[in-house]
Image (tube, rainbow, N blue to C red):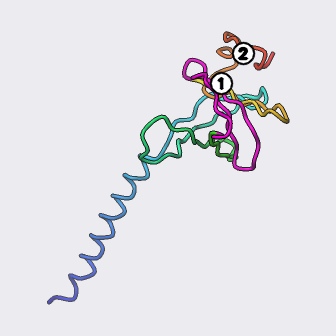
Amino acid sequence: MNLFRIPSMICFACVSLISASNKVLSMEVYEWENCLYNKESIPCRRTFLCGNAPPPCYSFSLEWKDGLHDSYKRDKTRISEARNFGYYKDSRGGEWELTGYSGSFFLINSKNKNTIIYDMTIEDCRKTPYDNLCPI
């Protein structure tokens, strides 16, 4: 056996693994959306946390362009009959009311009144029935 061939075979295996891992990582990238946090425009992206579970998925995280992030999970003790409304808890115990509207959603913290608007510009927000949550 030629000992000079072993490093090249190992190197080929390394390149193959790196290429495969880069393809997997590239599938994990989510698009930045227009979002509002307490009436301030900050891009964010949502990631569903259900893995291979069938829809609907009631657990997600939001990552903000400035690096902050949090996860939200539906509160199973408070079920709403409305299809576009639900109660959620964040990873620190905060309680939120989620209202869906035309593919976007509003999250309102019931205690401190913080507001998150996902996938909407300020102009889009002003055209909704929830325009009172939008910046002036």
Residue drawn at the location 67% of the way across and 46% of the way down: 69
Q: Nearer the viewer, residue 63 or 74?
A: 74
Callout 2: SS = loop
Tag 1 or tag 2, which sits nearer the N-term? 1
Q: Are marks 2 and 1 in contact (CB under 8 Å)?
A: yes
- Position of 15 compared to 43: left or right? left
What residue did someone put label 1 on? 99
Instruction: Return the x and y of residue 119 as percentages of the image width and height.
Output: 60, 26
Of all residues, the one furthest to the left in this rendering is 1
What is the quadrant of the C terminus in the image? top right
Q: Is residue 118 magenta?
A: no
Callout 1: SS = strand
Query: Looking at the rendering, which quadrant does residue 4 occupy?
Result: bottom left
Instruction: Return the x and y of residue 25 as percentages of the image width and height.
Output: 43, 52
- Position of 32 compared to 20: left or right? right
Residue drawn at the location 28% of the way across and 80% of the way down: 7
- Position of 54 compared to 119: left or right? left
Instruction: Return the x and y of residue 71 as percentages of the image width and height.
Output: 64, 45
**Numbered circle sitting on residue 69:** none
**What is the total number of numbered labels drawn onto the structure image?**
2
What residue did someone put label 2 on? 130
Q: Nearer the viewer, residue 102 or 97?
A: 97
Query: Looking at the rendering, which quadrant does residue 95 occupy?
Result: top right
What amino acid is at disc 1? Thr
Q: Nearer the viewer, residue 62 or 8?
A: 62
Q: CA distance from mark 2 to mark 1?
A: 10 Å
What amino acid is at disc 2? Tyr
Find the magenta span and give its range.
75-103
Q: Is residue 91 magenta?
A: yes
- Position of 8 compared to 58: left or right? left
Q: Crowding at label 2, few (<14), some or many (≥20) Cα neighbours within 10 Å?
A: few
